[in-house]
Image: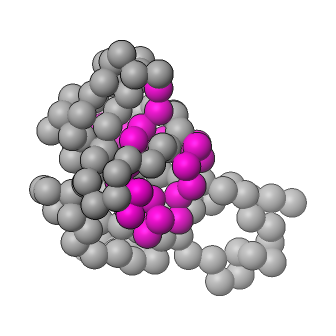
Amino acid sequence: MQTTMLKAKLHRATVTHAELGYEGSCAIDAKILDFAGIREYEQIQIYNVNNGERFTTYAIRAEENSKVFSINGAAARRACPGDLIIVCAFAGFNNDELSDYKPTLVYFDEQNNISHSSHEIPVQAA
């Protein structure tokens, strides 16, 4: 049996471009994709912190070290430059793989620099 789990999360990245005329997808700095283990053309879900929009697309590689997060095609109507987004990738794992499984979590500052990464979501005090 396969269980779908969070594979990678890019937390609170800032949208740099919204290109309605582009064919589609979300362009993300290649270095960030590699760091998170997200492949080009892999399905991703995007959650817009500013307006609550949630949508599915696929990742494409933007220029390395560009810090680009470009929402392209029809999805450009769901995010504007300056919006904060969360990008998630999911994958299927079998029970043996889940015994010590942890996702890759990547956190950003206001300029889309990686501030830190983790393999566990911190527990929030009530």
Residue 108 visible in rendering: no
Q: Residue at x 30, y 44 (%)?
A: 69
Left or right of residue 58: residue 5:
right
Farthest residue to the right: give it: 1
101 above or below 112? Answer: below
Left or right: 21 as drawn, with respect to 90: left
Figure coloring: one colour
Q: Where is residue 119 shown, x and y percent of the image?
A: 46, 77
From this viewpoint, is residue 18 visible? Answer: yes
Residue 49: name its quadrant.
top left
Q: Which of these two is toward me, 22 or 42?
A: 22
Q: Could you tell whether 94 is left or right of 104 in the image?
A: right
The answer to if 37 sits in the magenta stretch is yes
Task: Name the image quarter holding residue 122.
Answer: bottom left
Q: Quadrant of the C terminus?
A: bottom left
Q: Residue at x 57, y 55 (%)?
A: 39
Residue 11 position within the rendered picture, expressed as x and y whole percent measured from the top left: 32, 57
Residue 46 location, x and y as percent?
Answer: 41, 40
Name the residue located 56 percent from the left edge and 75 percent from the top edge.
102
Q: Is residue 36 above or below residue 14?
A: below
Q: Which residues are magenta?
A: 24-49
Task: Report if residue 39 lies within the magenta region.
Answer: yes
The vertical placement of 116 against 30, above or below, is below
As drawn, which residue projects farthest toward the front?
Answer: 63
- Residue 100 left/right relative to 18: right
Against 40, is 36 above or below? below
Residue at the image point whose x is 25% and y is 54% from the top: 67
- Of residues 99 and 7, which is closer to you in this image? 7
- Residue 81, image x, y percentages: 18, 34
Q: Looking at this view, is 3 or 89 the one in front?
A: 89
